[in-house]
Image (cartoon, rainbow, N blue to C red):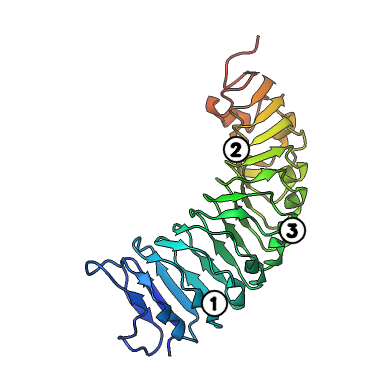
Amino acid sequence: MVSAVTWRAKGLLTLTSEVNPKTPFFKKAGRSGYMNGSISPSICKLKRLSSLTIADWKGISGPIPACITSLPFLRILDLIGNRISGQIPEDIGRLHRLAVLNIADNLLTSRIPRSLTNLSGLMHLDLRNNRIWGSLPRDFGRLRMLSRALLSRNYIGGTIPDSISKIYRLADLDLSLNRLSGEIPASLGTMAVLATLNLDANKLSGEIPYSLFNSAVGNLNLSKNSFHGYLPDVFGPRSYFMVLDLSYNNFWGPIPKSLSQASFIGHLDLSHNRLCGRIPEGPPFDHLEASSFAYNACLCGKPLGACR
């Protein structure tokens, strides 16, 4: 009986229990020492399989066998770094014990299945760098155990579901390099443990919710969108940013003086906007380079040129 299969690049096939070595789990092709075949539906015969990892082989192609959703004990499905194509199984939500779904860096071309939100025990979701399209399920917030949701570099459109704020364990949300539009739900700024929010390179617009600037978020990247208006003068002691990137938007007016009241700002990028006026003095401005303020309407003062 097999409970786990792990096959990683530069590693070995590891089975945690007895197995018949002639069982055709993988359809191999090509030269020895490099896996460039496909995943055989025979893997679905391992009814008590709890972990399937075929990661970073680069050459595994073909679809994810649809029968994979018939494995009732599967907790980990890790297929990162291959050339797997086709769709995410529509009934992926049948895998009620699934805690890790990592199919990043492949060639998948499907919507996010609606049944995905049935995975009530899912803790790690990584769909980065595929060709996934459509919108995020409106009930995404049903994934209450999720701590990381990484969906960057796809073709995901529509708006950001407000229900995401119900995922009280979510610490890392990466939706960058997609086609999202509309405004950021203000409720994201109320999430207790959300530390990283990457929404850069989308089509988001409107004003940034004030709540995000005094929240648990310490890495905030909203660059390369269509946000506009004045930057809110609402920063304070609760504002702590390792990274605050607001570049390549349409912000205008002065830089908020309250930024100097933030507890810490490591990297600040306000370049490529329409900001105007004197750059405030003191921290964090005294350690920033000119590139943080370049290509604005009429900013002046250190580290740019003197104001006239």
Residue type indicated by callout 1: Thr
Quadrant into which the N terminus falls: bottom left
Q: Position of residue 62 (x, y in %)?
A: 40, 66
Secondary structure of the residue carrying tag 1 is: helix
Marks 1 and 3: which is nearer the front? 1
Q: How many marks?
A: 3
Q: Residues within 10 Å of mark 1 (few under 14, many from 20)?
A: some
Q: In whole angstroms, how far apart are the C-alphas of marks 2 and 3? A: 23 Å
Residue type indicated by callout 3: Ser
Residue at x 74% of width, y 49% of height:
189
The residue that disc 2 covers is 223
Q: Nearer the viewer, residue 165 or 270?
A: 165
Would you say residue 167 is visible in this rendering?
A: no
Q: In whole angstroms, how far apart are the C-alphas of marks 1 and 3? A: 26 Å
Q: In whole angstroms, how far apart are the C-alphas of marks 2 and 1? A: 38 Å
Would you say residue 49 is visible in this rendering?
A: yes
Residue 163, label in figure: 3
The residue that disc 1 covers is 69
Q: Position of residue 40 (x, y in %)?
A: 39, 76
Q: Residues within 10 Å of mark 2 (few under 14, many from 20)?
A: many
Secondary structure of the residue carrying tag 2 is: loop
Q: Quadrant of residue 151?
A: bottom right
Please determine whether, in this image, residue 293 is positioned above or below residue 62: above
Q: Position of residue 143 (x, y in %)?
A: 67, 66
Q: Position of residue 273 (x, y in %)?
A: 63, 27
Quadrant into which the C terminus falls: top right
